[in-house]
Image (spheres, helix red, strand yellow):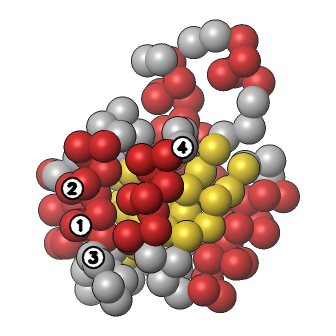
């Protein structure tokens, strides 16, 4: 890992189709020094993943137009080194485990504790940067 990687903010792409959730989480993570790119659809997330590099993706499992699992499958192809943390609502834990099988680095149940999410984001970013 080079010095620039160690000092720059974590670049996070946050993907969820619940706009209010995305807005609140973006504000809270930005206050903690994370550079957040909020995205409201899987298709937009994939477009951005092809264009920019992110340290971590936080991805909702259940979205209207494209499921989180479908997004994850494509991310593993276009940006295989990017850690993906899945978020899922109550009752979808089995699907989140399937996400881990498909290459997600971790998952959390919604609503999630911000401190726990922040720690998982930081840990995933540090691990990813160490391999760069």
The part of the image, by quadrant, that contains residue 11 is: top right
Q: Secondary structure at mark 3?
A: loop
**Point 53% across, 24% down: residue:** 129
Q: Secondary structure at mark 4?
A: loop
Residue marked by disc 2: 73
Question: Which x, y percent locates residue 13?
Answer: 55, 56
Mark 2 / mark 4, whichever is N-terminal: 4
Instruction: Please state if 97 lies on the left or on the right of 9 as rendered.
Output: left
Against 122, residue 7 (above or below) is: above
Residue marked by disc 4: 52
Q: Are marks 3 and 1 in contact (CB under 8 Å)?
A: yes
Q: Secondary structure at mark 1?
A: helix
Residue marked by disc 3: 67
Q: Nearer the viewer, mark 1 or mark 4?
A: 4
Instruction: Please state if 82 lies on the left or on the right of 114 as rendered.
Output: left
Question: Which x, y percent locates residue 27?
Answer: 78, 69
Q: Are marks 1 and 2 in contact (CB under 8 Å)?
A: yes
Marks 1 and 2, how far apart at CA? 6 Å
Q: Are marks 1 and 4 in contact (CB under 8 Å)?
A: no
Instruction: Please state if 49 lies on the left or on the right of 75 as rendered.
Output: right
Screen quadrant of the N terminus = top right
Marks 1 and 4, how far apart at CA? 21 Å
Residue marked by disc 1: 69
Crowding around mark 2 (Cα neighbors within 10 Å: few <14, some 14 to 19, many 20+) is some
**Point 64% across, 10% down: residue:** 2
Q: Nearer the viewer, mark 2 or mark 4?
A: 4
């Amino acid at each position: 890992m080079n010095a620039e990687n160690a000092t720059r903010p974590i670049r996070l792409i946050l993907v969820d189709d619940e706009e209010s959730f995305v807005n609140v989480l973006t504000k809270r993570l930005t206050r903690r020094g994370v550079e957040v790119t909020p995205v409201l659809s899987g298709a937009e997330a994939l477009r951005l993943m092809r264009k920019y590099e992110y340290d971590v993706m936080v991805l909702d499992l259940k979205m209207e137009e494209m499921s989180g699992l479908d997004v994850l499958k494509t991310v593993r192809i276009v940006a295989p080194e990017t850690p993906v943390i899945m978020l899922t609502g109550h009752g979808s834990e089995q699907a989140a485990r399937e996400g881990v099988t498909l290459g997600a680095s971790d998952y959390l149940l919604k609503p999630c504790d911000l401190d726990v999410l922040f720690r998982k984001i930081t840990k995933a970013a540090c691990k990813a940067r160490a391999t760069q």
